[in-house]
Amino acid sequence: MATTNRPLAPHIQIYRPQLTSVLSFSHRVTGIALSAGSVLLVIWLITAAAGEQAFYPLQSFLGSWAGLALLFIWTYSLFYHLCNGIRHLLWDSVIGLELASVYLSGWIVVFASAILTAGAWIAASLMAP
Amino acid sequence: MASSDTRTPVHRAVGLGSAKSGSAHWWSQRITAAALVPLMLWLTGSLISLAGRDYHAFIGWLHNPITVVLLSLLLIALFRHTVLGLEVIAEDYIHARGLRIVTIGLLRFAGVILAASGIFAMLVIAFGGY
């Protein structure tokens, strides 16, 4: 096809990041992170079924700094994807599509996901014996 | 219907559009999303309450029939939702047609295998007498 001289959409490298585009991209990135977390959930169930000997190596890794960092990333990804997913479901119901509402709901997602992540980790640290 | 509509009555009635799959993918993504909102909140809350506990506490939790049913439903919805989402990403970024088709096929297989494995592992715990 002779498409070489067609005008192109603004290229990503010269496109100024906006809240809307950053949140949209983040939805995909957190979705990919959560896909990896879902695989870990299944591995965790399999090691639990395989018995106590198989369970502890993974469990002790998750208790290490690297494991806790991964769990923290997954917790944040989950709450971000959840909050922004609800924002998407509202849009699908034709709610909040005006530009001002899109920015307001975007900031709500940013703060709600941070608060929920912090709340989950504070609750977990209070629960831990 | 506008007179400029060149679609046949059958095409219009079936309503699958030019992509031949209609709104099935889109709708399934939304339904699984709606199901996952309460299910993931339940799982997160459960795992928080088990934080720092030993193997027997986890196994005890996995022996609860409510856990087995909800976690099975969660795994089905989760992997359906995950595969649908990764499919869209593959469609957007993998331009070589053959590789794209193979990737999407493998994603679908992986989703079913992982959900089935997770549910089987739970049933082993529930019925295996740990």
Image (cartoon, coloured by chain):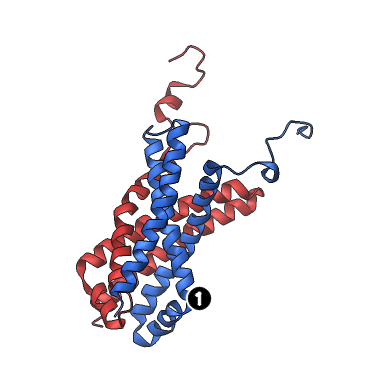
Chain colours: A blue, B red
Under mark 1, the amino acid is: Ala
Considering every residue shown, the one lying at the far left of the view is: B65
Question: Residue A63, percent across and down?
Answer: 42, 79
Tell me: residue B51, above or below residue B11.
Answer: below
**Residue that numbered label 1 is attached to:** A66
- How many numbered discs sit on the rendered protein? 1
Name the one closer to the observer, A123 or B18.
A123
Considering every residue shown, the one lying at the far bottom of the view is: A53
Query: Does B62 sit left or right of B90 as displayed?
Result: left
Q: Residue at horizontal 43%, vertical 37%?
A: B23
**Residue B81 visible to the viewer:** no
- Screen quadrant of the N terminus of chain A: top right
Question: Residue A42, percent across and down?
Answer: 40, 69
Q: Residue at horizontal 45%, vertical 64%?
A: A74
Question: Residue B103, percent across and down?
Answer: 57, 56
Tell me: residue B90, above or below residue B15.
Answer: below
**Residue B58 visible to the viewer:** yes
Name the one closer to the observer, A34 or A13.
A13
Query: Does B110 sit left or right of A17 as displayed?
Result: left
Q: Quadrant of residue A54?
A: bottom left
Q: Residue at horizontal 31%, vertical 77%?
A: A128
Tell me: residue A41, above or below residue A97.
Answer: below
Name the subunit of mark 1: A
Name the one closer to the observer, A49 or A116.
A116
Name the one closer to the observer, A116 or B4.
A116
